[in-house]
């Protein structure tokens, strides 16, 4: 079975803005399938708009990637909340924990299928039931 790649907002932004690490994200997108939480999609759209891109263009850029946006429901909210204490030493934000919660959820369904891509190198300092790929 192929992996289900979970993308953090930092990874998607690196790809869209052609920053260091974009090649690793591009490879994940090419292999597919990829998903991200609605929280992380909001982060991506917010950053693109903050940098002057109109919201319609930002949304089209995200849509063009073919990434499935997963609702941040009560179950993911609970997983993300439970990660707060564990991830506080690495400074994980709510967006970070939303991404990690989705990866944890995917890993619970199929341990061999969970890979998360991020620019947050600190995530690799903790042990996870999924693979963390730091893109830079």
Image (cartoon, grey):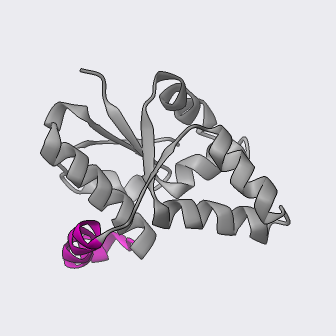
Residue 109 occupies which quadrant of the picture? top left
Q: From the viewer's perspective, is 81 left or right of 20?
A: left
Q: From the viewer's perspective, is 130 left or right of 57?
A: left
The structure residue drawn at horizontal position 14% and vertical position 47%, both measured from the top left corner, is 108
Q: Position of residue 30 (x, y in %)?
A: 54, 24
The structure residue drawn at horizontal position 47% and vertical position 67%, both measured from the top left corner, is 39
Q: Quadrant of the N terminus?
A: top left
Q: Position of residue 9 (x, y in %)?
A: 53, 56
Main SS category, magenta section: helix
Whether residue 54 is in magenta: the answer is: no
**Residue span colored magenta:** 74-93
Whether residue 89 is in magenta: the answer is: yes
In the depicted structure, whether residue 23 falls above or below residue 128:
above
Can residue 93 be seen by looking at this rendering? no
In the depicted structure, whether residue 70 falls above or below residue 117:
below
Q: Position of residue 46 (x, y in %)?
A: 67, 69
Can residue 110 be seen by looking at this rendering? yes
Q: How many marks?
A: 0
Q: From the viewer's perspective, is 134 left or right of 3?
A: right
The structure residue drawn at horizontal position 57% and vertical position 66%, both measured from the top left corner, is 42
Q: From the viewer's perspective, is 116 left or right of 9?
A: left
The structure residue drawn at horizontal position 31% and vertical position 55%, both measured from the top left corner, is 102
Residue 76 occupies which quadrant of the picture? bottom left
Q: Position of residue 59 (x, y in %)?
A: 70, 55
In the depicted structure, whether residue 93 falls above or below residue 57:
below
Residue nearest the viewer, comparing 82 with 77: 77
């Amino acid at each position: 079975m192929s992996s289900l790649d979970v993308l953090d907002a930092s990874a998607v932004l690196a790809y869209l803005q052609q920053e260091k690490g974009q090649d690793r994200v591009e490879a994940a997108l090419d292999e597919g399938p990829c998903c991200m939480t609605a929280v992380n999609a909001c982060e991506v759209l917010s950053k693109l708009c903050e940098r002057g891109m109109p919201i319609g263009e930002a949304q089209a850029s995200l849509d063009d990637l073919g990434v499935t946006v997963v609702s941040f429901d009560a179950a993911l909210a609970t997983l993300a909340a439970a990660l707060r204490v564990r991830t506080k030493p690495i400074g994980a934000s709510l967006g970070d924990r939303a991404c990690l919660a989705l990866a944890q959820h995917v890993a619970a369904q199929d341990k061999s299928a969970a890979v998360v891509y991020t620019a947050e190198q600190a995530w690799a300092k903790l042990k996870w039931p999924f693979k963390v790929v730091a893109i830079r």
